[in-house]
Image (cartoon, rainbow, N blue to C red):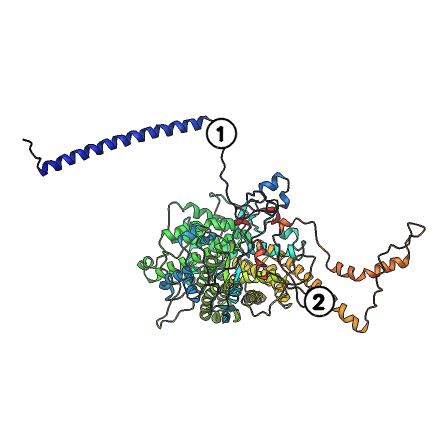
Amino acid sequence: MTRTPSPRRKGLLTLFSAAQSLEVAEDSKEKGNSRLRQQLDQNQKNMDQSPREPQYVRVRVANACDSCKIRKVKCDGKLPCSYCTRHKRAQTCHFTPQKRRRLNSVPSPASDQEHQPKRLQQQQQHHSHHNDNDTTTAPSSSAHSSAPPDAAAANPYHPASSSTQSRVVATITPAPTTVGSAGSALRDSSVEEEAEVPRDARLLYDAQGKLIFIGDCAPLSFFQTVRQLVLSRIDPHAFAHHTGRVPVLQNVPPSHAVSSGRQEPYVDTDTVHSIVNKYLAVTSGLVDLFGSASLVDDISTWSDHKGHDVHAAVNYLVLAIGLQSVDDSLASSYFEHAKVLALATLGSELSVGTVQAFTLITVYMLRACQITGAFLFFGIAVRAVYSIGAHRTEVNSRFGHDIRRHRDRLWKSVRIIDLFLSISMGRPPATSDVDCTVPYRELDSEGHEIFDLLDSSVQVLLIIETIVLEVFSRKKISLQLTEGISRQLRKWSNRWLAELKRIVGTPPTQEDEAKIVGACHVLCSYYYAVMLVSRPFLMYEMCKRLPESPSKFEAAVRDSGSSGRSKLANASIDAGSLMIESVADLLQIGVLDGCMPLIVSWLFAASLVVGVGLLGDFGRILDKDVRMSIAALEHFAKHDAHALQYSLIIKSLHISATEYLERKERYERLQISESSSQLFGLTPRQPREPSKATPRPSQDNNFHSPAANHNTVASSEGADTVRDLSSTFFEDLDPSIFPFIHSSSHTPELPVTNSMGQNQDQVFGALNLFPLLEEGGHIDLAHYM
């Protein structure tokens, strides 16, 4: 009799059999994996032992050179490419920028609102604790402090290409533009709203022959773009050798160095008061590191009992900056001794004095045109100010009201110098407002903002930082983005501009000299912000107005000046003219010192803008402004090597502009005379050219009939006149040097040219504005130095 297994026993048997099956499966899987690993190891060993040809991965390039396109061969995208190098055509290797493609679909107004710049909105929210809903400040993230501005292009902003509420800015005043309902009209409006942003990053040589990076927004990069434009379209001889190929960065080495064991320099107590007042004047609006009321007394007391600590280094640096344009030899001795003291105490002492010392070293080296040294020493000041926590106002408040205010202003001073250095050189800033809680405005008991030069200066420089991050880190700028920035500038102008102009216009006294210079610093930064945001539109208009080559005089098609881009171009020129006039007025009354690095840098940019405006025939009245800028730069050139170089550049640009305008007017007048002279017979009618039959040869082959010579000369007289006026310059010049191609340039009012330029919206895109970025970081410096 068989026993029927119980349900419990059945379950145990089933579980046991399943476990056995699982164990067998795992064993077989392990054996299979072992055999597979052995086979792979054997194959790898065979591959390593057998020689074979290396396999190259084919990489697609964004654009091929013109020669490879014509021959339909592979191009590696380098300049010169490998194909042209192998065939000894490196000089003719040239890349044509790809044409812009218009959008097939038009975004709706609702989608336009979704594409607002998120960074701009986050920036306004971040600075609400600074300025109580004030959007004039512009934070830079920690990534921006370690990465170049071009890194921001990884997340590009796509502005609304067309909108029923799109606006244009005319001299920082918005005006609504009407947009048609048809799709083609909206697409045309999207093109009208945009302009290419020049990415002019360069590698330039300094005085020691070292390569230095100059970023997109720097005035020196703007000069290189202007230089290319003038050389390729106006005159190949526009800029002389000393203004085109010699390094513009003229770093002046120190006069002499001192050892740590040298005797400390002598300080005359009787001159301390005047020297300190000079220091306060030249640094007004840039730094405020001390209480100005007690600084004179503190240094006078210290001069009797000098020490060797960081406090002594700070006092020597104050005296060195005050004497820099008066007695350069004594100032240099003070500076060298102070630098030794500051470096000696760096490892053992870290305090507010450390920040003061290295910030003053930076200011002195900027005024001495030692840009590279100033950039490096300022890095120590930035690390020191973060180390003592001066960027957090709650930390500063623990030391009392007076010390809190002093440490807050110390942070603002470091922020101003950092922004000036980064903007003027086109490099990422070292400081950031991400973790900063120091307010950039002060309110009185009634809630009104207190006028302060340091606050106004840092606010306008933060707007410039916004322009660099939101405009120059991208390839395009739209009128919508420009309107957002102009709103910040208008808000700043409503608060500060009237008071600043009142200070600059007051008769100078010894007490008011510091205020006047500080107001001039702030005004120049404001005008530079306007020029910087509207500069791409100015260059767009210039490429439309200038002829294609030096051998032609036909101007491009012009609008009536009512378009958005035209208004912004005029706004840039107006800002440059206002800056030049302000600086010239202060120079006339003898207020400005000879060493003013911020004013010189922004004045050079203004001079380039006004000079370009004169070249583009924006008005012959600009000739006066260009002459005033040259005179101002020559005044600063007595103590500033940069100003000397800048004055030579502007002189060359002025000469080229005036000569071009004279040739152009003479050519236009000749065209008018050819038609008007026929009314009254002002010029004798030329005899009709004889038939093309060859004349009868004379008996003497070396003898030519005078009548025949006369007919030949007379028949070609008019053509020769025009040909002489529009004679070509260097027709065999290598076209790869000048990346201006396929640009239309026609004038409807000239009788010789009746055809309208095609693809006018792509004129500016034909200019290769990104040589350093598109060529893998390589740039041929021989054409720029």
In this view, the residue in front, 27 or 750, is 27
What whole-number distance in Å separates the C-alpha atoms at marks 1 and 2? 69 Å
| Disc 2 residue crowd, few under 14, some 14–19, many 20+, Cα 10 Å | few
- The circle on residue 630 is none
User: Does residue 51 appear in this view?
Assistant: yes
Q: Position of residue 586 (x, y in %)?
A: 56, 66
Sequence-wise, which precedes: disc 1 or disc 2? 1
Residue depicted at 37% across the width and 28% down the height: 39
Q: Is residue 639 visible?
A: no
- Residue 318 lies, in percent from the top left, at 47, 55
Q: Amino acid at mark 2?
A: Pro
Where residue 121 sits: x, y (%)? Answer: 40, 62
The relative height of residue 332 versus residue 103 in the rendered view (above or below) is above
Q: Which residue is mark 2?
A: 751
Q: Point out residue 309 in the picture as x, y percentages from the top left corner.
A: 41, 49
Most distant residue in the right direction: 699
Residue hosting label 1: 52
In the rendered view of the protein, which quadrant contains the N terminus?
top left
Q: Contact, CB < 8 Å: mark 1 with mark 2?
A: no
Secondary structure under badge 1? loop
Q: In the image, is 397 to the left or to the right of 44?
A: left
- 266 vs 437, left or right, is right
Closer mark to the observer between disc 1 and disc 2:
1
